[in-house]
Image: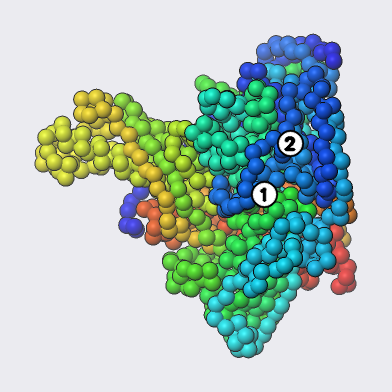
Amino acid sequence: MTKTHVTTTINGEVTEFLCEPGATLLAVLRNELQLTGTKEGCGTGDCGACSVTLNGRLVCSCLVLGVEAEGAEIGTVEGIGGIDKLHIIQEKFLEHAALQCGICTPGLIVSTKALLAENPEPTEKEARYYLAGNLCRCTGYDKIIRAVMDSAEAMRGDA
Amino acid sequence: MSEAREYKYIGRRTIRPDGFDKVTGRANYGADLSLPGMIWGKILRSPYAHAVIKSIDSSKAEAHPDVMAVVTYQDYPAVSSGGFEPGDGPTDLCDLARNILADDKALYHGHAIAAIAARTEAAAEEALSLIDIDYEVLPPVMDVADAMQPGSPVLHEDLFTKGLAEQPEKASNIATRMELKKGDIEAGFAAAEVIIERDFYTPTVHQGYIEPHATTVRYDEDGQSMIWCSTQGHFDVRASTAKLLSMDLGKLKVIASEIGGGFGGKTTVYLEPVALMLSKKSGRPVKMVMTRDEVFRASGPGSATRSTVKIGAKKDGTITAMQAKLCFEAGAFKGSPMGPGCMTVFTPYDVENIYIEGYDVVVNKPKVAAYRAPGAPQAEFAAEMVINELADELNIDPIELRLQNAAKEGTQTVYGPKLKAVGLVECLEAAKNSPHYKQALAENQGRGLAAGFWFNIGGQSSVIINMNPDGTGTIVEGNPDIGGSRASMQLMAAEELGIDVSKLNPIVADTEHVPYSATTGGSRTTFATGMAVIEAAQDVVRQMKERAAAVWNVTVEQVDWSDGVAINTAGEDRLTAAEICQGADRTGGQISGRGNINARGAGPSFAVHLCDVEVDMETGKTAVVRYTAIQDAGKAIHPGYVEGQYQGGAVQGIGWALNEEYIYNEDGVMENAGFLDYRIPLASDLPMIDTIIVEVPNAFHPFGVRGVGETGIVPPLAAVATAVSDAIGVRMTNLPCSPPRVLKAIQDTA
Ligand code: FES
Ligand code: FES
């Protein structure tokens, strides 16, 4: 099968790859570009482990084709916080023990960042509904919601 | 156990040492490893729930240009039937072999039949359709009650019921019958003034870990083969795989990746022995990752059950007799958690007369795997529902009724030992005094309460603490960290060594770098591996004191150790751990402590959960509006992760009670094998989950620790179902209390 050449921007870096027409953005990120921070829990848009932003919009990368990344801006967990400084959301997840196994965490960090960009002052209910697409089987969500609400407050305080 | 001991580190909510990697996406899980030259493996699965495999023709697949290996059951050395203990309880090697790849019979829809390795994942997938299989389809048996009927289709012609007075002559689906008793059950019921007997059903459920099974392997003819995989126990992956491929343990290295949830479901092998055989045949590293569909159809699940519980009591609330019949589905091969179900069902109660019978029954569903407190949620659900009905019948508060009959220190369990100090009464008192229990209920709301018990286990754990020349230390352990256990190991080592947590780095080593450690399961890790950490730390301290004594030319007895500093009691001298490590080259070489133990004395953990729900009478949909989980931790090493275990267990239990179930069609095909239709709880389904940590120390652990991981899933089934029953005025005895079932119950009584 002929592969398509795609030029895109991932976490601010211009990136090129060759892609089968049917390959998902998730498969490209993980298998071609070795950006394995984005996880696969289902491949059918039901778990949110593969959450990334596409031109600022939160999407399941398992439901996006690799070729759709052409000319787009992609944001993954690898672009949030880093060696020198964690993002507030990441710090709050650690502080609140909001992860157990951690497989849902990259997706939740990406989704929480998108939530707080859209709505810096969510109610608990709004946070719960925005994050309803991110499954976590370990925590029962209590500590995740606390970390999200605390992040929102801290980020407002910083602004 | 010195209760007065003041802790410096234990009980602190430290940041977990592996946290940075996990919030930044750097942590590597099962599917995250690729190797040079790697190819992809895929499995062909049975489209029938029950069928004879008459022939397999893989010649067309083998001719495909991208296919590099095809593997079936026939590629493995013959194994003989017989128990061995690779992981969570005994496994029959023959059954294990026939589960990873079917022999002459497909026993469930999704049963692995053959595997292909090809250059790309897509090519492997495509080539599966080139394998020709001739099946003779048989009628499936999908329910434990049907499977126990004399005329039922039989899965295994060589399965004869164990545990009967007389050895049966005919094969059946009942693998084992067991019986537990105490006192005189007839006399117990004769003494009762009220007797309640009910039947219960719980469905097949899945552990539902978010990370699918995944592995990358490399077979090496002469040297060292390697398996990288997501597992709760890499030593047991090594044991099972080495047995199936007839290899020496020393020739197989297993590296545990970070693990994205397990809950018991990653205590066995599915892909690893298949991937390694594909690698052997192709000469290439092989990666295999299950889809979510495969996870549902061919891994896990937890047993469906049918049970009957009968309880008799006096009018004053004294329980005189408890009786249960528990029938557990094992899936396609024997070995459901029926045993622990029987052992736990009535353990929260100190009652004289008990009779329990259990059945382990095969059906055409995937072979069940352990699921958090395996067997206990289903069994105790039935018991707790009857206890709650009894409380209503006697007009006694459900907490008071339980307090009146609660198991406590000295209670004779039906399965053997007398209980040591346990925290059930303390949990019940905490429930009684909680703000939750005092809250008034609104319209269409109901309340439920239930107790839960789980034994917890100990077992073998190995830990090495290597001190570095700058006084920092590496804690080398062999238990995959599934929920923050590295943080607990770090805290316990810091406490014992008197060295700050920031200077101690816990790592999970592969099977070559630390001696055998039993699987992360049975709530054993913080307890047993924690004990090994303490022992290794004490070994380090002993050596530190010897070195200081040598420097000062005094006896070891004259050296004290406090806060990470050696003190010469015969003088003014002090040496810090860092100074001793820096000078280790001059005092006899580097310092390294060991703790290789087989831990006994795991303390059981009791819990009490309180649940308030609101039911929409028009639709039958239930919302949990208030929830409190109360549980005895013995001693909470890291309270944040202890609370997390309570909350996670509670919410899995809420899912089990309200929505989760395998739905099969009449051909035995699961119809909801995805997260959209097998609905685990979402953030928007839940309230905050309040927790109360009760601490009744376990006398057998230096810090008083009890395992906390599993008990939390035991009470929710009955707590939630009782709350729903309370709201709608109908007793819900069949799970899940999903909207259609609840609506039907409402309409049937209207
Ligand atoms: S992997 Fe994309 S939503 Fe689950
Ligand atoms: S922490 Fe394990 S799935 Fe969320």
The front one of B173 and B620 is B173
* Lateral position of residue B275 relative to residue B88, left or right: right
Residue B544, position as x, y percentages in the image: 25, 36
The local crowd at label 1, few if under 14, some if 14 to 19, many if 20 or more residues have their Cα within 10 Å, is: many
Q: Amino acid at mark 1?
A: Asp
The local crowd at label 2, few if under 14, some if 14 to 19, many if 20 or more residues have their Cα within 10 Å, is: many
Disc number for residue A106:
none
Mark 2: secondary structure: loop
Residue B37, position as x, y percentages in the image: 65, 18
Q: How many marks?
A: 2
Give the chain letter at badge 2.
B
Distance between mark 1 and mark 2 Cα atoms: 15 Å
Residue A45, position as x, y percentages in the image: 79, 35
Instruction: Give the vertical position of B174 relative to B310 (above or below).
Output: above
Q: Which residue is mark 2?
A: B72
The front one of B282 and B497 is B282
Q: Is mark 2 within 8 Å of ligand 1?
A: no
Quarter of the figure with the N terminus of chain B: bottom left
- In this rendering, does residue B348 appear at all? no
Q: Earlier in the sequence, mark 1 or mark 2?
A: 2
The residue lying at 68 percent from left, 71 percent from top is B325
Mark 1: secondary structure: helix
The residue lying at 74 percent from left, 49 percent from top is B366
The residue lying at 42 percent from left, 56 percent from top is B600
Q: Amino acid at mark 2?
A: Thr
Q: Which residue is mark 1?
A: B95
Quarter of the figure with the C terminus of chain B: bottom right
